[in-house]
Amino acid sequence: MSTQSSHQVTGSATGAALASAKFDPRIAGYGRWSVSLVLFVTVVGIPLIPVWLLFSFWYYVEYLRRISATLTTRAVEIRQGVVFRKEATIPLNMITDVRLHDGPLMRLCGLRGLHIETAGQSGQNATSEGDLTGIVDAAAFRDAILTQRERLLQGQAAGTAPAEDAASTPAILAEIRDILARIEARGE
C-alpha cells in the first residue's frame, strides 16, 4: 500500500492520516479512450474527438495533480475535480461496503475502480462521493479502509475511545471535575 501522494495529509479534523492512495497515470489513457468512444458512438460527436484529445492532455495533468484519497482514523477524505471540484468526507462508521470494479476498457488500461457505499445508498446505479478510478493497488486501499472501519466499530461497541481521544481524556475529566466543583460552590 502506498502512503505517498501529492496531497500528503498528516492530520485533520477526522483524525490522523493512516494511508493516502496513489493514482495511476494510466487514468489519462482510460479517460481519453472512454470519452472518445462516447463521442464516436453518438456520431454527432465525431468531429469533437480531435478537440477532446487536445484538451485532454491538459485536463489529465491537472486531474492527477488534484485528486487525492486519504484514510484517517475516522473517515475517508476525497478531493477531486479540475473544473468542478468536490471534497467529500465519508465517515467510516457510515460505510456499508467498499467494492472493487473494472470494465473491459479499465482492464485494457490496467486500472481498477473503488466504490465506497454508505448507509442509505444501494443498488447498481447508485452514485456516491466515493467513486475512485485508478488507485494503485486498489485492493490494499480497500482492505485498509475495511480494517480501520472494523477497528472503529469495535471501539464504539466496546465503549472505548479511539487512541487519539484517549490521550485527552484526563484533561476532559479534570475540566468536568472543575465544573462540578464550581456548581457545588454556587449551591452552598
Image (spheres, helix red, strand yellow):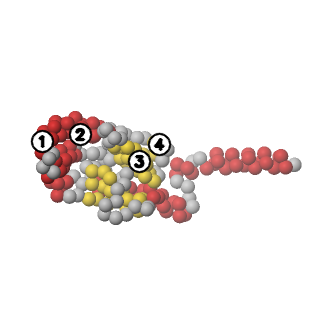
Please state which of the two labelled residues, at mark 4 or mark 3, is closer to the viewer: 3
Dot 1 crowding, Cα within 10 Å, few <14, some 14–19, many 20+: few
Mark 4 secondary-structure assignment: strand
Q: Are marks 2 and 4 in contact (CB under 8 Å)?
A: no
Mark 1 secondary-structure assignment: helix
Measuring from the top left, give residue 183's x and y in whole percent.
79, 48
Measuring from the top left, give residue 153's x and y in whole percent.
48, 61
Mark 3 secondary-structure assignment: strand
Task: Locate residue 176 relative to residue 144 in the image: left or right.
Answer: right
Give the residue pinned by disc 3. Answer: 88
Kindly tell me whether residue 44 is visible in this rendering. Answer: yes
Give the residue pinned by disc 4. Answer: 12
Three-letter code for the amino acid on which mark 2 is drawn: Tyr
Q: Quadrant of residue 161?
A: bottom right
- N-terminal-most mark, 2 or 4: 4
The extreme right residue here reads 188
Q: Quadrant of residue 23?
A: top left
Give the residue pinned by disc 1. Answer: 47
- N-terminal-most mark, 1 or 4: 4
- Mark-to-mark CA distance, 1 and 2: 21 Å
Three-letter code for the amino acid on which mark 3 is drawn: Ala
Three-letter code for the amino acid on which mark 4 is drawn: Ser
Please state which of the two labelled residues, at mark 1 or mark 4, is closer to the viewer: 1
Q: Are marks 4 and 3 in contact (CB under 8 Å)?
A: no
- Mark-to-mark CA distance, 2 and 4: 27 Å
Measuring from the top left, give residue 133's x and y in whole percent.
27, 51
- Mark-to-mark CA distance, 1 and 4: 46 Å
